Amino acid sequence: MGIEKLTERIIKEAEAEREKIKKEYEEKIARLKLEIEEEKEKLRQKEKEALAKEITKERKRILAEKRIEQKKEILRHQWTMIKRIEQLVKERFRQEIGNYYELIKEIGKKFTQPDNTLFFSPKDLPSVKDQFPNAKSNEKLSDGIIIENEKGRKEIHISLEAALEVLKEEILLEFKKYF
């Protein structure tokens, strides 16, 4: 019977050792599973943060594009208004100045020196050519007169375009107050 007891005792000790080892491995496995879950959660959190940053960045980009488009649209409307005002001023200019050709002839006569060059609009040139045979046409003018010295420097620039440039700047300054 001694062998049976010894065998039983060895078996019990082996089972106790097996249970101890099993328990240690189960604890290690549980810790590893916990660490893996914690790591997964950290990764999920990082992905959420990165995605949130990307979404915020995209929203800001879209808003900036919309603001730029709105500003462009406002500028288009402003220039349309300026062009319309310019057109109205040009239409009314000749209506309001009944003796327009006499006016530009008088300006040319009064301020021209012998070595000056006179420029008129293509539309006006035929009406003043008899008084100023050396006058030239300037496609950029719709009305008025430009007098240049021999060096090509403008001495006098009395034209609707010059007046409208000043007017455009004033209008733009007014627009900036509101937009």
Image: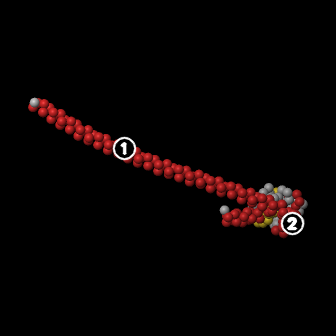
Whether residue 51 is visible, yes or no, is yes
User: Which residue position holds label 2?
Assistant: 97
Whether residue 118 is visible, yes or no, is no
- The mark nearer the N terminus, 1 or 2, is 1
Residue drawn 12% across and 33% down?
A: 5
* Quarter that holds the N terminus: top left
Amino acid under disc 1: Ile
Q: Which mark is residue 36?
A: 1
Percent across and percent down for residue 56 are 53, 52
Residue drawn 86% across and 66% down?
A: 97
Q: Left or right: where does residue 61 sit relative to residue 31?
A: right
The Cα atoms of the two marked residues, 1 and 2, are separated by 90 Å
Residue drawn 86% across and 63% down?
A: 94
Percent across and percent down for residue 83 are 76, 58
Using the rendered view, name the quadrant where residue 6 is placed.
top left
Could you say which is closer to the camera, residue 164 or residue 52? 52
Q: Left or right: where does residue 157 sit relative to residue 66?
A: right
* Quarter that holds the C terminus: bottom right
Q: Give the number of marks.
A: 2
Could you say which is closer to the camera, residue 51 or residue 152? 51
| Label 2 environment density (alpha carbons within 10 Å; few <14, some 14–19, many ≥20) | few
Percent across and percent down for residue 176 are 67, 64
